[in-house]
Image: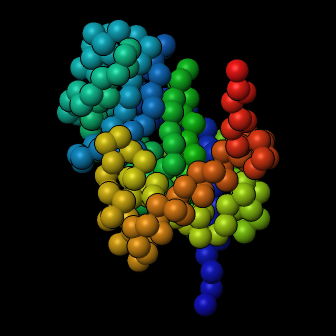
Amino acid sequence: MHELMTSIADIEIPADGTGAGELFEAVPGLNCEMERVIASSGHGLWLSGPSQDEIEHALDGASAIGNYSLINSDDDRWLYDLEFDPETVDVFELIIEENGTVLSASASNGTWLLSIRFTDRESVSSLYDRLEELDVTPTIVRLFDLEEESHTQCGLTARQYETLVAAIDHGYFEIPREVSMQELSEELDISHQALSERLRRAYRALVTSELNVSEDETVAPPVPSN
């Protein structure tokens, strides 16, 4: 049985020529961040930088934007559900067509930075070629394969890694959660308790690895007595 090699590609794409290009022309200080899970047929984007009035004025004037609606707000940013005109370049749809999964997407200064997971490098090349054909020239910032070593580098076992990836894919870490722990445990065919323990061990491994501390250092020192 052939085992697929998962690849992660970090790609920069100019917003000019895509569905969001007109927004950056109208409000150059605009910042965008994709909301991975949203219950609609469009795209959920957090927009910030200019005022809400300026943002909605730009949305109204953008020919590439069809319907839009305000979903949520958080301090000085607003979550909109946007639908792009079918004739415009919808980068997110192209990624889906090439069997890619957007892990994160943000844009500022008229440039998108996307982190995308693919099942093979051929899909990365295919997406690159399709964007170039549409006169949207991408820049591959980083491309690497997720081998077994990538799990152990951050202290994760293969099962912990697979569990975290499944949790992300099913929306467990979204706010609000798109799947309960019980539903996720059923999806992974393990018990609720086993899933809880595996996630806690994975969190601990990631924290100790990323903060560069030893296991001993994660134990709180005793409180001195008076």
Residue 89: which quarter of the image? top left
Residue 123: which quarter of the image? bottom right
Numbered label tally = 0
Along the viewing direction, whichever of 6 and 213 lies nearer the viewer: 213
Question: Compared with residue 85, is residue 192 higher up or lower down, i.e. above or below?
Answer: below
| x, y percent for residue 168 | 46, 54
- Image quadrant holding the N terminus, namely bottom right
Specify how the rendered protein is coloured: rainbow
Residue at the spot 60% in from the left edge and 63% down from the top edge: 161
Horizontal relation, residue 35 to residue 81: left or right: right
| x, y percent for residue 158 | 64, 69
Q: Does residue 165 appear in this view?
A: no
Residue at the spot 59% in from the left edge and 64% down from the top edge: 160
Question: Compared with residue 168, is residue 51 higher up or lower down, i.e. above or below?
Answer: above
- Image quadrant holding the C terminus, namely top right
Q: Residue furthest front?
A: 226
Q: Does residue 78 appear in this view?
A: yes
| x, y percent for residue 177 | 33, 48
Q: Residue furthest bottom?
A: 1
Along the viewing direction, whichever of 197 and 12 lies nearer the viewer: 197
Along the viewing direction, whichever of 222 and 167 lies nearer the viewer: 222
Residue at the spot 35% in from the left edge and 40% down from the top edge: 175
Residue at the spot 48% in from the left edge and 14% down from the top edge: 28
Along the viewing direction, whichever of 222 and 44 lies nearer the viewer: 222
| x, y percent for residue 223 | 69, 30
